[in-house]
Amino acid sequence: MKKASVWLNLKRYRYVYLMLAIVLVWYIAFAYAPMFGLIMSFEKFSFAKGFFGSELVGLNNFKMLFSDRYFVQAFKNTFAISFLRIVFEFPIPIIFAFMINEVRSKPFRSVIQNITYFPHFFNWIVFGGLIGSVLALDRGVVNGIIQLFGGSQIDFLGDSRYFRTILIVTNLLKEVGWNSIIYIAAIQGINPTLYESADLDGVNRWQKIRYISLPGIAPTISIMFILFVGGVFTQGFDQVYNLYSPVVYDKGDILSTYIVRTLKEVPNLGVQAAAGFINSVISMLFLLVSNWVVRLMGQESIY
Amino acid sequence: MKVRKVTLFDVVSGIVLALLALVLLVPFWQMIVVAFSTTEGYVKSTYHLIPTSFSVDVFSQLFSSSEIMKGMLISLINVLCGWLGGLILCAMGAYALTKKNIIGRKFIFNFIIFTMFFNGGIIPLYIWLKKIYITDTIFCLFLPTLISTFYLLLLKNSFISIPAEMEEAALIDGYNEMQILFKIIIPVSKPVIAAVSLFLIVQYWNDYYNAMMFMNKPDLYPLGLILRNVIISKQALLRTPVAAGAVLPSEQYNMALTMIAMLPILVLYPFVQKYFVAGVMIGAVKE
């Protein structure tokens, strides 16, 4: 481009450049500056000396992390819990969508939809607090039901054997309705003439689901699966942090909660920044792979 | 259309759905029952499924507590700044990216997208915010999360589909691009703006994370963090030996506070329902 035309372009779009500049300043100040701050994970960081003045210690912080039993545990837990989420939290909203779609009574359907969408809008302080009282030992409804049938009380939130199950089940309760919206919309978007001609052929309901609905929403399912896998690794801070306690760290502590928890217990900023670095790199790998697969499938990826 | 026969599938699935709804309603119902019960009523009842007493004492206690009222005010300010600031910045970035003739457009696009894949993590962010004197001010509640790249892209995808003729007409009328964005582009993108607004309002009303990480002044705690400190510290205390002598807030107090924290969302809910589908659809699949 010639100098004159660059000038003309800048002048012609000056308001656009102004808006862009404001946005980019934010990105530099709040997204890129902390990235450069990651240098502290290679330092014995001292606040007074700052990001570029602290003493460099090479990979020491990372070595310390991997010799910390609690970090290794959190590392493994993050993978294990992510895996459980993919296996259970991904498919169940799809089944839920089919069930909702088969409900014929409009009022019943809209009541169920509203009740199940509702908890999505609360954070885990609110929802976790309510779950906490339902699962409580002495006054909790769940333990009341267990005792009614002759069982003995279970300390659900205080026993690490149950903790992962509770994470999955309670997150499903909170999100199943919301996560099904996209599938319900996809099912309703299928061309109705397909069902009409199936009716003429005397096809039953299972066959309609199997041969029309399911293939009809297959593209949605596959794209959602990839997005789900891409995001699963960074999920769950809010839930875990508000449901767990020291007794369940061995099964429940994940990388993001490990960082915040150790920061509050024994601040060692260089080491905790290194833990964050590892977390960021792994979640980036998840995202890159899933995004690459989206493109391979010929879908225009959202990124 | 012919009437279908009620089959076993209908019965089973109806029961499962009804049970799910019931399981979700019980905790919320208990919350209401407990929040409105008297101390004696609370002690007498075990599961709080049937209201046996009625009192609004904890509510008057809450509404006269300056800590809670201040927390609500902080949360409201946080919602307004985070929502409007976030929406305006995302819309400006989104609109600028729809302009094909911008120099370095591809680079800027990648510069923005990269932040979706990688971030510095919470510790460097905290140190940096401290260095630039943002921690312990009201700005630390919304500035660090002000632009969501995800919403920026949603808006961009929606703005691109607006016919160019609308803009050309406005240019001829002497509008500049900033006026076009605020007077034409945003008003004609109502569903996506409404959906993003909903998500932002809920996000900032519920937020406690920014405050927990960056705010050390209890005077400026938003309601979410106050609620967390009350509820979660109680649950944690119950699991540690220290609990024996400590004075804990009553369960009625906790539940009433939870109800107050839910209130704005309850009020908003009926008005935004119609945007749910638009909201998630644009969020997931772009065809």
Image: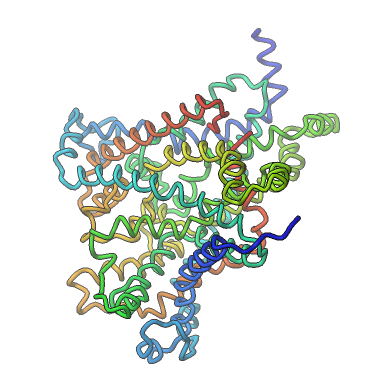
- Within the image, what quadrant is residue A156 found in? bottom left
In the image: residue A108, left or right of residue B27: right
- Within the image, what quadrant is residue B231 found in? bottom left
The residue at 45%/47% (across/down) is A90
Res A71 visible: yes
Query: Vertically, is B102 above or below B145?
Result: above
On the image, the x and y values in percent for residue B120 come to 37, 36
- Within the image, what quadrant is residue A280 found in? top left
Residue positioned most to the front: A202
On the image, the x and y values in percent for residue A216 come to 61, 40
Q: Nearer the viewer, residue A280 or A14?
A: A280
In this figure, which colouring scheme has been used for the structure? rainbow
On the image, the x and y values in percent for residue A34 come to 38, 36
The residue at 55%/52% (across/down) is A97
Quarter placement of the N terminus of chain A: top right
In the image: residue A99, left or right of residue A244: right
On the image, the x and y values in percent for residue A154 come to 26, 70
In the image: residue B114, left or right of residue A205: left
Query: Vertically, is A157 above or below B123?
Result: below
Residue positioned most to the top: A2
The residue at 58%/57% (across/down) is A100
The residue at 57%/64% (across/down) is A112
Q: Nearer the viewer, residue A86 or A274?
A: A86
Res B89 visible: no
